[in-house]
Amino acid sequence: LGLSGTSMAFLVWIVVLMVYVYIASTLDVWKLLQPRDYINSHQLLVGLGILYLGLFFSTPEVTAPAINATSGGEAAASWFPLLFITVACGAISGFHGLVSSGTSSKQLDCEPDARFVGYLGAVGEGALALITIIATVTVFDSEGAFLDAYGSFAAASSGGLAAFVRGGAELATGLAIPAEAARTIIAVIVVSFAATSLDTSVRLMRYIISELGSEYELPSLERKHVATGLAVGSSAALVLLPEGPKGFGSGGYLLWPLFGTSNQLLAGISLLLISIWLKRRGSNPIYTLAPMAFLLFMTFWAMIDQVFGEWSGWGAENDMNLLLFGFGAVILGFAVWIVLEAVRAWRTVEEEPRAAG
């Protein structure tokens, strides 16, 4: 294959992971996903406990500037709308909407448990996001060191995970945990969540492919192993075939800029569907309509700015990125279509009759 030793090792790991996610995503939920996630939930609780207690006892100094007005010598990107497509899972995430309906719902003993599981999961994500920010703004010795690491988007994209692991380990040393052991603990927590996301996302891809097969009368796509094979095969092709910005095996980075907007578009659409469901039940939907309107406005703004500004190359310094422009335009078109269909459904929905007594 003409690969270096590092690239060959990377290829072997990718093959191993693809075989794993194929097996994991085709097994029944209770055989692997549920017990593995049960273990990971305790890892999260223990990890959060270590980090927050370590923060309390170590009281580190925040060395990051409150506002970074420059980015690589140029004017920094506007907070509006980019902030609202950057902060994802710690605040609101469309991917989690898919997870909650695709896998979480299948593991509940009864419907009322959804409130406890959903709220606790959301609070846990927010707590993790908060301590992640704290870890990365306190790990550097000075403001200059922080700006070297986060002074531009290019610099920030190269070492964000390492900064969190180092910063989290520094917080953990406040509990007298040795630095090397603390780094290992934080790294294991990060890897465990990555593994959880990996096979869960492939399982969700399988569900979506099967539903498309059912919708368009393609029974072969409804078969578990056919749908899983397509999901795993397309993922492997995306990672291995194109030449990514970080060399062999980094093809996924080519589409990564689409994650923020597509994820938050999905979150806004999820809130819209929940609002329709609440209206049908005769409940007040304002609690989901208000954040939905704000989120969709910000996300459509960001998507239009990226697709027709940054990626199109029209009247801008950047060259046209045909891949991101094409996929972004398609996602934007589908999002507009879904919102229009949802608005039509909103106008025609009728309240369900309530049971007497």
Image (cartoon, grey):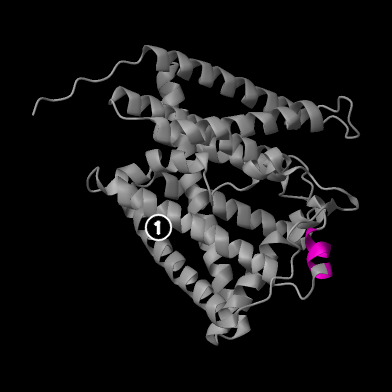
Residue 298 within the magenta-colored segment of the rendering: no
* Horizontal and vertical percent position of residue 312: 81, 27
Q: Taking the image as drawn, is residue 74 in sight?
A: yes
- Would you place residue 194 above or below residue 251 in this image? below
Task: Please name whichever residue, 198 or 129, is drawn nearer the observer in this view of the structure.
Answer: 129
Q: Taking the image as drawn, is residue 207 in sight?
A: no
Q: For mark 1, does the 10 Å Cα neighbourhood hold few (<14), some (14 to 19), or many (20 or more) residues?
A: some
- Would you place residue 30 above or below residue 173 in this image? above
Give left or right: position of 109 versus 241. left
* Residue beneath the point at 62% across and 57% down: 13
Kindly identify the amino acid type of the residue bearing the numbered disc 1: Asp
* Horizontal and vertical percent position of residue 115: 31, 47
Please give the range of residues in magenta. 144-150
Give left or right: position of 139 versus 321. left
Residue identifier under label 1: 37
Residue 149 within the magenta-colored segment of the rendering: yes
* Residue beneath the point at 46% across and 28% down: 272
* Residue beneath the point at 35% across and 16% down: 349
Quarter assignment of residue 66: bottom right
